[in-house]
Amino acid sequence: MTLERNRTLSQIFKNMATIYKYRGGDDRFKSIAYGKVAKVINALQEDISEYKKNNSLEDLPGVGEGIAQKIEEYLKTGKIEKYESLKKSSPNELLEMIDITGFGAQSLKQIHEDLNISTKKELVKALQEGSIRKLKGFGDKKVENMLRGLKLHKEIEDRMLLSDALEIGEQILKWIKEIPNVKKVELAGSLRRKKETIGDFDVLLTCDEKDRKSVIDSITISAFAKKVILKGNTKISIIHKNSDRQIDFRIVNEDEWGAALQYFTGSKEHNIHLRKIAKDKGYKISEYGIYSTDTEKKIAGKTEEEIYSTLGFQFIPPEMREDLGEIELASKHLIPKIIQFEDLKGDLQIHTLDSDGVNTLEEIVNHIKSHFSYEYIVITDHSKSLRIANGMDEDKILKQIEAIQLMNKKLGEEFVKSGIEVEILKNGDLDISDQVLSKLDWVTASIHTNFNQDNTERIIRACENPFVHCIGHPTGRLIGEREPYEINFEKVIEASKRTKTVLEINGQPNRLDLNDKLAMLAQKAGVKLVISSDSHSLANLNYIKLGVFVAQRAWCTKESILNSKSWAEIKKFTKFHSKVMSTIIL
DNA sequence: GCCGTTTTCGGCCCGACTGTTTTCAGTCG
């Protein structure tokens, strides 16, 4: 994938921010500046050198003369002198621990300077043997806290999948709702924003002032609380027994609900940006409400809508709150109407017993008819060369087409479309003949083997096949297991547009492929997308909702999501033996 | 180091909790 250079540069700036934070004093403001730029560069969707070419480096937020110079230096020489010299003067190995709970910049500094400790190993040893207690300010509790942070860090390094987190979130909600006198409870944080992986849970609740103590006690003594980390009048943190994850609870009064929900949902970057703007406008935002800076009077706080409208903004859906420009859009009342699950008219990737699914066509149709309100579905079993998935050969495909026709006759409507998830072979050929593909209503082409090569040409060739409508899980990544395979996404976008081949947002919990960033990029370029469940069982059909979350985080509207349209409209857009394609073939 | 519809200097989001202190710094989200 491209943008590798942006990531490296962003990491350098992040490290510089860490070092400045460690140095403290006035340097902590440099830390803020570099930290901000690191995030900005990481989020860029074009190579940083393009900005240099256009002389627009300093147009990037947070980039001024000094940092622009450093970026240029990096582009020219591959390194930044200032960073190299900073590294020489700081305990870099220790600084890698700065994100661990209990290991702040000042603590690390004291440990390094007073105990002459420079490596992780030495630090862990000092913690375990207790020699760290010699330091001023390091009592029993603090040392214990650091050891716990170290242990937790190892466990939390692998974040959990959104789908698992949503399930646990439901369990937490059920638990809290059963506590007497709890009036309202909602999940906030990255789960509410539907990030693809979740580190911990944020739960907001209200109760009457008089019941606060009993509610807090109910939570902390519950069997669901494996360990209580922190307990105050408004904040509680525990380790959840079922998931071994941290849950942060926040208890607020009812008239603070909106402000608290907004604050607790984040993202952090979104909130900081919002608070800065509020400050400029003469307001102060906290989790308790919006206050006038002059009179210190509270102006809003009851609902989230009120928070945004008081600032003159349109409401921003939680999925969009990542400080990627949504605040600017909201100020102009230009927040797009993002896609909703209810907008979808069909599921375009479903597997049956005919390859590696576990249900028959009939079971699937019956289930969908009683649980979804789709206008159509597409059956897309695997093709022959994917042996491990019991892929279908030409004969079996033709038989399946007949079975589907029979099913539609029974239903009295063309509800089931015949499709396939066809293998893109190593050289970009497909493993099923055009002649057979031409008989299908919908062809999704995917890569499942031979990842270790540049797959750009391979995918472009599949796009150019006149019978391919869609590229399935275009980057092949498996969250936490496998990196995306190598493709030049800009070129894939170009081919997709040129050939009217759509790209899939696959809703499998560990795929979510395209991801939010790439889906956003694709929509921006004018590429059409589809959202599919890629289901292999009846329960899997709900995965399509995870795909919708990705699309929402990518700001996708109905206009970009093809399966929000009727089948007739889909046919109109895609090549479908259309004139567009025949000219390409000729 | 960045940034400015009151600023080219003097700020940089805001508040809760903990631990170690006697009034607050460090850390966290």
Image (cartoon, rainbow, N blue to C red):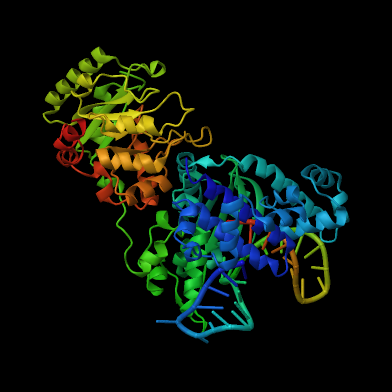
Between A451 and A153, the one nearer to me in the picture? A451
Looking at the image, is B3 positioned above or below residue A447?
Answer: below
Q: Inspect this view and state whether residue A213 appears.
A: no
Between A339 and A117, the one nearer to me in the picture? A117
The quadrant of the image that shows the C terminus of chain A is top left
Q: Position of residue A292 (x, y in %)?
A: 48, 81
Looking at the image, is A141 positioned above or below residue A387?
Answer: below
A240 lies left or right of A270:
right
Between A406 and A394, the one nearer to me in the picture? A394
Name which residue lies at 28% across and 44% down.
A528
Q: Position of residue A487 (x, y in %)?
A: 43, 36
A567 lies left or right of A528:
left
Q: How many marks?
A: 0
In the displayed image of the protein, which residue is found farthest to the top?
A395
Q: Position of residue A426 (x, y in %)?
A: 40, 23
A327 lies left or right of A582:
right
Q: Inspect this view and state whether residue A199 appears.
A: yes
A88 lies left or right of A482:
right
Looking at the image, is A62 positioned above or below residue A41?
Answer: below
Looking at the image, is A292 positioned above or below residue A42?
Answer: below
Q: Quadrant of residue A544?
A: top left
Name which residue lies at 38% across and 44% down.
A490
